[in-house]
Amino acid sequence: MIGISAALAPLMTRLVIAVGVALSMVACTGKELTQVVVVFSADEAVSERATRMRISVYSLDSDELVYDAPFRLAGAGADAAFPVRLPMTPAGGDASRKYRVVASLFDADATETAFAQVSAVAGYVPHQTRTLRLHFEDACADVLCDDGLTCWEGACRGACFDASAPDEGSAGPLCGSCETCFAGTCVSREDGAFCSVEGHICEAGACSDQGPFPACGRSPTAAFEAATLGLYRMEMADVAAGVLKDEIPTTKTRTARNGTTTGKTRPGPDGCGTALETGEGGYALLFDDRDGDPQSDWSLENGAFELLLSLDALPVEPDDRAWGIVTRELVGDDPPGQMGLYVNHDGRLYVTVKIGTGAETVARSVCAAQPLPAGDGSWHRVGVNFGVQGIELVVDGVPANGNGSVSNPVNADLACGASIADTSTALGSNVPWLIGADQSTSIAPSHFLRGAIDELRFYGERRNFSPSP
């Protein structure tokens, strides 16, 4: 049973009557009503922007929608204004019931997409009136969280709440930014989820404090799936007899597609176990459907990847073109979205993405970093963002800020970091990712990297690869 404040009475007269019956029962029994009053408030900028609001309440046991009300906040005939109050009582007087309440705000645009949303999972206290305060923050405008989460202090956190006594303030969600509210309990979010610190991720239920790059040797993460914006991690372990085992929830092998039948490993950076060694004998790793990887995994239009890299040698100019590190290029075809991370003859890393159509002339955007040493055993962290917001290359925390001087590919049509305005064709190329080589000039992988790769991770959205202040 749910009641609603007088401010919204014109919309829900029947529910107001239901609350009146409940109040009459209190007078007869002498027991205080079991009730939660949800109070919605908003920062001034959010309140001024909002023209409509919708409140929905679900039974947590069955996920049944038990209350749903849209109403106007602004203009002639407005139904209510902040703060909005929603009194609720449990069906059948059962104080053990839990509920999920979701409130969404919409602006003047005729859109059905909310610009702000708050959510809470909570319960009742027998024979007590409690208050659940949910606030629309300016910092949470245009931040929409997944189910089980709500935006609090600018970040998504698990949406479990305890309703407080009427004269107390709200203590906020019970869960942290690496927890979600499931069945009324805070549980750890999946490793790789973004948490409250920009550029950091959740690992083992906590927001990583290791800087914007994940630490080595952490627990395996979710499989790489674009549809879920998941995180895919390859720790580069157990390369032998032509296969490489990754760390994913179910152990899986990857088959070498070219060159020798035996892959090699070497010690990775301190604490990172083993690394994949490429180049010798033409060993590379290709994601393709022979290992059960669906093509949707290759069609990320916006995303990121990062890795640890050690260079043994460099291409020799002019006889040897740049070597591929991580690429999704394919000879004889030029769909937009083909891209690659390469090392040039002078030790510069560069990333390029194709943004036009046609097999002959394809526009490109290129970012090039400062030269790296080769042959000294040093390891470097490399991060790449790609998509319509432009490409970004970050090496050891330093963003590349120009096109640089690279012999391959030809001069770029767009500057490093420039937004890609032409989205008439999808930027996901459906070309498999190739690790440790290139495939843009031959049918088989070629131009093999001579070095080692460790801790390769793919993301379904952009990351902040620069150090946090």
Image (tube, helix red, strand yellow):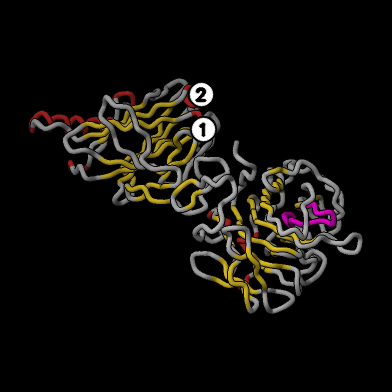
Viewer-side residue, 168 vs 390: 168
Please say whether residue 204 is one of the residues in the magenta stretch. no
Q: What element carries label 2?
A: helix
Going from N to C along the chain, the mark reached first, 2 or 1, is 2
Q: Can residue 352 be seen in this view?
A: no
Residue span colored magenta: 336-349
What residue is pinned by disc 1?
141
Percent x, y of residue 337: 72, 55
Amino acid marked by disc 1: Ala
Q: Is residue 156 above or below residue 378?
A: above
Residue density around tag 1, few if under 14, some if 14–19, many if 20 or more, within 10 Å:
some
Q: In this view, does 255 lie above or below 410?
A: below
Please say whether residue 342 is one of the residues in the magenta stretch. yes
Percent x, y of residue 168: 29, 26
Amino acid marked by disc 2: Ala
What residue is pinned by disc 2?
45
